[in-house]
Amino acid sequence: LREAYSNEEILQDHILKLRLLKYVTEEIYDSNPLIVVWPWLNKINYSKDYTRMIKEFEGLGIPYIDLVLYLKKYKSEELMLNSRDSHPNEKANQVLAEIIYKYIENQNCPVKTATTVEPDLLPFYSCKKNN
């Protein structure tokens, strides 16, 4: 992943996909995307590899949540599955859920349930543009 951010060809492809995501969510679903930026949990305060992507989110007007701001108060061990696997554990996911819920609540978005979202879109959520 770190190499991807330093490889201009890969980075440009990623940016193109961001533009497509923005177009699809705004024009087809009449919604806004929300990007959640996960830091490297084993080095939370040193996760700057994605700084360029944050500039792209801002340039495209895509809202994002940079989790470094919320997770830096925790020790890495509190958020990782274990010392050999830096994927987020239950606590990290709980923190993320609370942050996203507050964001949605502050946007006055109706909370969608599984019965109001098509099954293939369950991992996807964004607020209507008009809200």
Image (cartoon, rainbow, N blue to C red):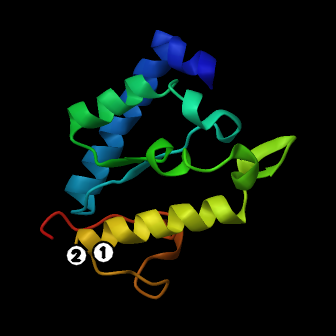
> Please, which residue is most extreme toward the bottom here?
115
Which quadrant would the N terminus be assigned to in this image?
top right
- Image x and y of residue 40, in percent: 63, 36
Tell me the quarter of the picture where residue 58 sits. top left
Q: Which residue is under mark 1?
A: 105
On the rendered structure, is 30 left or right of 35? Answer: left
Instruction: Please name the residue shown 62% across and 50% down the image.
Output: 74
On the rendered structure, is 124 left or right of 93? Answer: left
Name the foreground residue: 33 vs 27. Answer: 33
Q: Secondary structure at mark 2?
A: loop
Name the foreground residue: 30 vs 1. Answer: 1
- Is residue 59 positioned above or below 10 on the image? below
Q: Which residue is under mark 2?
A: 108
> Please, which residue is most extreme toward the left here?
130
Tell me the quarter of the picture where residue 116 sits. bottom left
Instruction: Please name the residue shown 52% across and 24% down the image.
Output: 49
Name the foreground residue: 77 vs 53. Answer: 77
On the rendered structure, is 19 left or right of 97? Answer: left
Instruction: Count how many numbered circles sit on residues in the image.
Output: 2
Q: Mark 1: which amino acid? A: Glu
Q: Secondary structure at mark 1?
A: helix
Instruction: Please name the residue shown 40% across and 19% down the image.
Output: 12
Q: Mark 2: which amino acid? A: Asn
Instruction: Please name the residue shown 47% across and 13% down the image.
Output: 9
- Is residue 26 positioned above or below 112 on the image? above
Q: In whole angstroms, how far apart are the C-alphas of marks 1 and 2?
A: 5 Å
Which quadrant would the C terminus be assigned to in this image?
bottom left
Label 2 CA crowd tier, 10 Å (few <14, some 14–19, many 20+): few
Find out whether the residues at labels 1 and 2 contact each other: C-beta distance under 8 Å: yes
- Image x and y of residue 48, in percent: 50, 25
- Image x and y of residue 70, in percent: 48, 51
